[in-house]
Image: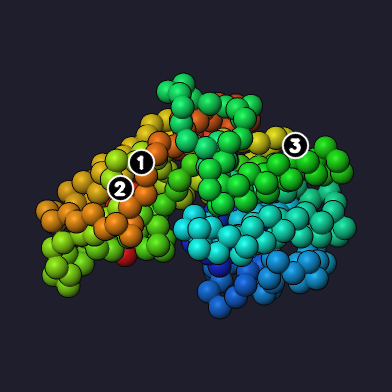
């Protein structure tokens, strides 16, 4: 398939492009800037998702047979500092993509990279499936929940082959240090190499997440764009939570350092627990399961940072 990837020059976009190309697909893309495009793409255009005209022109030019919509703002703190930008990008940007595809490529298979944050925090130890009600907390989660519901509505309202992937937290080599695992790794690498004092500034280490390797996640996206069913949401998640404290300890162990830990009030957020998700539907539809041990993910991040 000729697959359009939005946000192609971002962290996930690079891994997804490699996954798609290795599977024999032709990849085209859009992003705000195309100065850092992945290798192997057939074409890429600059496009601002908040501009309906830009998006329509890009889709018209690229003529995709499928689209994986990664583009948007993925950092929750941006929602607190600039909610208008986040809402415009994540909600209106998704609407512009869907409308452009409806006009220019109505038979295209479409996958929105949603998030497990649409479910809110955990109130149960029982893993929840795709039928669980959405209960987003914070502007980022609200924007993704709106985009998620809108994408699925296009299957009902316009009979387009739209799907959403509600992925849990994922990380890997090359992620921006504005995200917690990469931020820890950057500091720990500096301590190990002697370029930083052996003191780390951290936020709340008690919060719990279900992390995965980005390479497992993009494999899920590839399988869904190939095999996923119209109008369906899919959970993409591992089976266990881990605390932020555990991640910090594992990185320190891998780097053989024992830093002094200082809590930074600017980084501190209230303790929360990501919900446990069941990815049974994903496995039944595509055979997907996460395969990369998270300790290997952490080691790879330390080597790359």
Depicted 264 relative to depicted 32: above or below? above
Q: Is residue 97 left or right of residue 233?
A: right
Q: Which x, y percent locates residue 263?
A: 23, 54
Q: From the image, tell me which residue sits under label 2.
A: 204
Q: From the image, tell me which residue sits under label 3.
A: 231
**Res 62 seen here:** no
Separation of disc 3 and disc 2 at Cα? 37 Å
Give the quadrant of the C terminus.
bottom left
Residue at the bottom extreme? Answer: 35
Q: Which x, y percent locates residue 200?
A: 20, 59
Q: From the image, tell me which residue sits under label 1.
A: 271
As helix, strand or loop, the secondary structure at mark 3 comes to: loop
Q: Nearer the viewer, mark 3 or mark 2?
A: 2
Mark earlier in primary sequence (1, 2): 2
Task: Classify 10 Å Cα crowding around label 3: few (below 14), some (14-19), many (20 and above).
Answer: some
Q: Residue at x 66, y 67 (%)?
A: 30
Q: Residue at x 52, y 37 (%)?
A: 120
Q: Residue at x 37, y 44 (%)?
A: 270
Q: Is residue 179 left or right of residue 148?
A: left
- The reply to whether the C-beta atoms of the residues labelled 1 and 2 are less than 8 Å apart is yes
Separation of disc 1 and disc 2 at Cα? 7 Å
């Amino acid at each position: 398939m000729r697959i359009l990837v939005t946000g192609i020059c971002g962290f996930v976009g690079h891994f997804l492009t490699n996954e798609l190309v290795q599977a024999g697909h032709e990849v085209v893309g859009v992003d705000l800037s195309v100065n850092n495009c992945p290798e192997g793409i057939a074409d890429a255009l600059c496009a601002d998702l908040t501009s309906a005209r830009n998006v329509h022109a890009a889709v018209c030019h690229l003529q995709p047979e499928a689209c994986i919509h990664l583009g948007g703002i993925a950092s929750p703190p941006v929602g607190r500092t600039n909610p208008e930008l986040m809402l415009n990008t994540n909600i209106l940007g998704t609407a512009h993509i869907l409308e452009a595809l409806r006009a220019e490529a109505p038979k295209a298979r479409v996958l929105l990279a949603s998030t497990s944050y649409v479910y809110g925090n955990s109130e149960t130890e029982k893993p929840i499936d795709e039928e669980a009600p959405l209960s987003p907390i914070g502007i980022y989660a609200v924007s993704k929940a709106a985009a998620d519901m809108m994408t699925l509505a296009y299957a009902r309202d316009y009979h387009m082959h739209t799907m959403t992937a509600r992925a849990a937290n994922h990380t890997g080599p090359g992620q921006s240090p504005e995200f917690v695992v990469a931020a820890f790794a950057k500091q720990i690498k500096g301590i190990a190499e002697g370029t930083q004092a052996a003191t780390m500034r951290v936020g709340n280490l008690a919060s719990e997440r279900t992390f995965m390797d980005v390479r497992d996640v993009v494999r899920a996206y590839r399988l869904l764009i190939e095999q996923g069913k119209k109008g369906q949401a899919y959970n993409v998640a591992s089976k266990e939570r881990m605390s932020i404290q555990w991640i910090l300890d594992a990185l320190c162990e891998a780097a053989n350092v024992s830093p002094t830990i200082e809590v930074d009030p600017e980084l501190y957020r209230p303790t929360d627990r990501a919900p446990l998700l069941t990815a049974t539907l994903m496995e039944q539809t595509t055979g997907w399961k996460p395969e990369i041990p998270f300790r290997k993910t952490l080691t790879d991040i330390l080597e790359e940072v």
